[in-house]
């Protein structure tokens, strides 16, 4: 059984080694590429041998199995094998050289991975370049290797392969009236696999279109920008076909336009701007390499892509609109759909979660760019007070600090961190007076990350429960509210900053997971910046949701599914990947639902596998669940539209996805009922999926969710067309 499983993994690695050349892991596309590589049978055999050797040796040496299966260690060896097999005559010596050339390429791949990974840069096809150049230069001393004459006597070769039918088909296809630019485009695509014919390029283009509409459109964009640029500057664009350098522009366009950068009009614009530079580099390097009778192959593509990615990483200001993909999916379309809808995950990656520094309900007396203070470089701060039902912040006359409701209330740590600094010993002001000399009053600064600190000021002297250098947990008591510094009456001053000094320039940074109280209505805010005069409170955790949604690796989940008077039982299991990602796996349907969880909520990240899987029902209904309960609050998130629309309409959406999403899906979770606020036995929720087409709202599917304290979850469809009941025991 173990042997079969390893062979399956090796087969996946071989297939992905072919498709990885186009940044893909699509098996059907890979199969088409294998067919293309065998248009010249000896080149195909050499390429396959090289892939086998590279992947098997990588397995034997114990390198990352996930990377091997993705084809990351095989695609460069494949290119070297194809190039070597096409360049030299078939012979035992040829396969002998291919064996050691693939070993060399693998070692170069691993070495470059070790070097470039430190800078978060890809090695692309640099190992192929070093491998093929080494073979070509060394072969001048290898007398047993004869240069290939295949392609010179095309009709003889075709006749030997398929007789008159093969010759007739070749003549028919060659006589098709392709425009010159189309002919060169197909030749350029074929040249990626060392095939000098239009048929190879046509097959690759069909596979590329099947794999990704965005990648296909970018291949055309890249080629035709280069084609028109050649024409505009008066260069001989026939070189695109004769020297097979057109693939540099195709690969550059796909890499910059959709793979390493999230596809958008900005990535397309930069693709257009970078292609003329690629042409200049290609033309210049071709002259240099001609001295050694070498082709530049894919060197220009490597230079431009690696250089541009590195330049983006040197930016001091990270732009959200031209950025690395958060999560790369099986094609650029799915990457767009996921990145534009994975709001909670994206925010969690962008923002370290900072909570409110108090318990209970408080009011925002002064917000960002305040009326009295919070100006210029200190504008991004808040002042918090407590008010009563009459909108007053004090009892009695308010002439004494002890009259103020917030005075001596506990101040808590807004997040885990280390106490960076404490200022103490400043007495409270009398009401209406301020200390302008010691402006900040008693203050505390907490280091949360290397570039993120929080500061809390106007604290009561002598109430600190911590000292400098202490590690504090979120929610731990720090001190008490006072009236020290520039404070006419008791309040909490709270700000975020990038440096560890009291009074540092403030950061425009959101607060995580709080309740906005609007009269009798409550709104749950995941990440937000409280506004002036709003009433807010930290979102309280619900014990049932905390317990039931605490999925851990190794845990088994019993499932009972009922639909159409039929019932079946399943077992799901939770796993963790080498990259610390957790997922629920259904063995029966070979489906996986990836998720992440924190104190605030449980969020599904992505679903892979069978769309008829019962696991997808859990994914849809528990897509984004906050671990808090307030009756009648509503939580809304965007969800991947490709899970809810038919393939035909999705194909149209795919082409324009970088510019506009006209298909959208919204996940809505309503918190309906809780049987007891103090010792609850169950919680009732209602989940909905709302589809929209060009902003026009469409079909809604709803389900009731019943969660028991013992860990049982029951999901019941409200849909008359698709009734089901899913009972999950965690």
Image (cartoon, grey):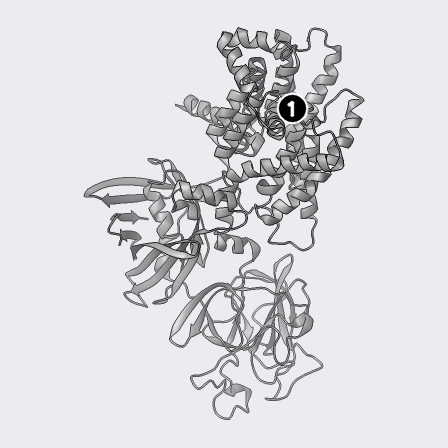
Q: Secondary structure at mark 1?
A: helix
Q: Closer to the camera, 35 or 408?
A: 35
In the depicted structure, whether residue 506 falls above or below residue 548: below
- Front residue of 701 and 128: 701
Q: Residue 56 in the image: x percent, y percent? A: 54, 22
Q: Where on the picture, by quarter, is residue 415?
A: bottom right
The percent coordinates of residue 434 (x first, y second) are 65, 85
- Provide the residue designation for mark 1: 105
Residue 219 x, y percent position in the rendering: 59, 35
Residue at x-position 52% and y-position 25%: 203
Residue found at the very far bottom of the displayed protein: 397
Drawn side of residue 281 relative to residue 576, left or right: right
Q: Residue at x 74, y 22 (%)?
A: 294
Q: Is residue 340 above or below residue 201?
A: below
Compared to residue 131, the image places residue 580 above or below, namely: below
Residue 580 in sight? no
Q: Is residue 475 visible?
A: yes
| Residue 657 image offset from top left, x and y in percent | 51, 47
Image-based side of 25 in relation to 140, left or right: left
Would residue 93 be found to the left or right of residue 658 on screen? right
Within 10 angstroms of label 1, few (less than 14), some, or many (20 or more) residues? Answer: many
| Image mark count | 1
């Amino acid at each position: 059984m173990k042997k079969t499983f390893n062979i399956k993994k090796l087969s996946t690695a071989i297939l992905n080694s072919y498709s990885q050349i186009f940044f893909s892991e699509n098996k059907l596309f890979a199969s088409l590429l294998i067919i293309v590589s065998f248009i010249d049978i000896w080149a195909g055999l050499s390429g396959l041998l090289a892939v086998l050797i590279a992947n098997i040796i990588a397995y034997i040496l114990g390198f990352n199995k996930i990377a091997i299966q993705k084809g990351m260690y095989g695609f460069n060896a494949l290119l070297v094998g194809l190039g070597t097999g096409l360049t030299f005559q078939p012979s035992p010596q040829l396969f002998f050289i291919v064996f050691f050339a693939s070993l060399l390429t693998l070692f170069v791949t691993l070495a470059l991975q070790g070097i470039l990974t430190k800078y978060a840069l890809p090695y692309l096809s640099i190992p192929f370049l070093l491998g093929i150049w080494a073979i070509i230069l060394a072969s001048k001393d290898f007398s047993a290797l004869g240069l290939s004459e295949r392609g010179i006597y095309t009709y003889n070769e075709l006749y030997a392969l398929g007789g008159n039918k093969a010759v007739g088909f070749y003549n028919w296809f060659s006589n098709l009236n392709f425009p010159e630019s189309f002919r060169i485009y197909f030749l350029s695509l074929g040249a990626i696999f060392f095939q000098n014919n239009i048929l190879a390029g046509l097959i690759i283009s069909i596979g590329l279109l099947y794999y990704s509409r965005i990648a296909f459109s970018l291949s055309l964009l890249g080629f035709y920008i280069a084609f028109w640029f050649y024409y505009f500057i008066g260069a001989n664009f026939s070189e695109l076909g004769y020297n097979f350098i057109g693939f540099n522009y195709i690969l550059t366009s796909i890499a910059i336009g959709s793979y390493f950068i999230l596809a958008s009009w900005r990535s397309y614009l930069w693709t257009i701007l970078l292609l003329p530079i690629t042409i200049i580099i290609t033309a210049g390097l071709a002259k240099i390499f001609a001295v050694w009778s070498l082709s530049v192959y894919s060197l220009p593509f490597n230079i431009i892509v690696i250089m541009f990615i590195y330049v983006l990483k040197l930016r001091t200001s990270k732009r959200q609109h031209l950025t690395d993909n958060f999560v790369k999916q099986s094609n650029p379309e799915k990457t767009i759909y996921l990145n534009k809808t994975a709001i909670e995950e994206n925010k969690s990656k962008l923002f370290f979660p900072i909570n409110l520094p108090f318990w209970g309900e408080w009011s925002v007396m002064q917000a960002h760019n305040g009326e009295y203070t919070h100006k210029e470089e200190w504008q991004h701060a808040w002042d918090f007070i407590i008010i009563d039902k009459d909108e007053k912040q004090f009892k009695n006359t308010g002439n004494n600090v002890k009259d103020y409701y917030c005075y001596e209330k506990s101040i808590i740590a807004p997040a885990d961190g280390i106490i960076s600094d404490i200022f103490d010993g400043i007495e409270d002001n009398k009401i209406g007076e301020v200390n302008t000399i010691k402006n900040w009053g008693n203050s505390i600064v907490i280091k949360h990350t290397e570039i993120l600190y929080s500061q809390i000021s106007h604290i009561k002297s002598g109430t600190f429960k911590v000292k400098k250098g202490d590690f504090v947990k979120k929610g731990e008591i720090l001190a008490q509210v006072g009236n020290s510094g520039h404070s006419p009456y008791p309040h909490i001053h709270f700000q975020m900053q990038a440096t560890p000094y009291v009074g540092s320039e403030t950061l425009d940074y959101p607060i995580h997971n709080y309740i906005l109280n609007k009269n009798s209505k409550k709104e749950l805010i995941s990440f937000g910046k409280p506004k002036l005069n709003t009433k807010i409170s930290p979102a309280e955790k619900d014990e049932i949701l905390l317990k039931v949604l605490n999925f851990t690796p190794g845990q088994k989940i019993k499932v009972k599914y009922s639909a159409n008077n039929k019932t079946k039982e399943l077992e799901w299991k939770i796993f963790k990947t080498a990259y610390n990602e957790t997922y629920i796996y259904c063995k029966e349907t070979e489906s996986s639902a990836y998720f992440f969880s924190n104190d605030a909520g449980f969020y599904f990240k992505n679903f892979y596998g069978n769309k008829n899987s019962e696991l997808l029902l859990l994914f849809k209904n528990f897509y984004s669940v906050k671990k808090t309960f307030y009756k009648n609050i509503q939580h809304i998130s965007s969800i991947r539209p490709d899970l809810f629309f038919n393939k035909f309409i999705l194909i149209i959406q795919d082409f324009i996805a970088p510019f506009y999403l006209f298909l959208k899906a919204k996940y809505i979770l309503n918190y309906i009922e809780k049987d007891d606020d103090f010792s609850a036995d169950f919680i009732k929720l209602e989940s909905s999926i709302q589809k929209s087409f060009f902003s026009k709202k469409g079909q809604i599917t709803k389900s009731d969710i019943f969660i028991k304290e013992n860990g049982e979850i029951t999901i019941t469809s409200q849909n008359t067309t698709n009734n089901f009941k899913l009972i999950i025991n965690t």
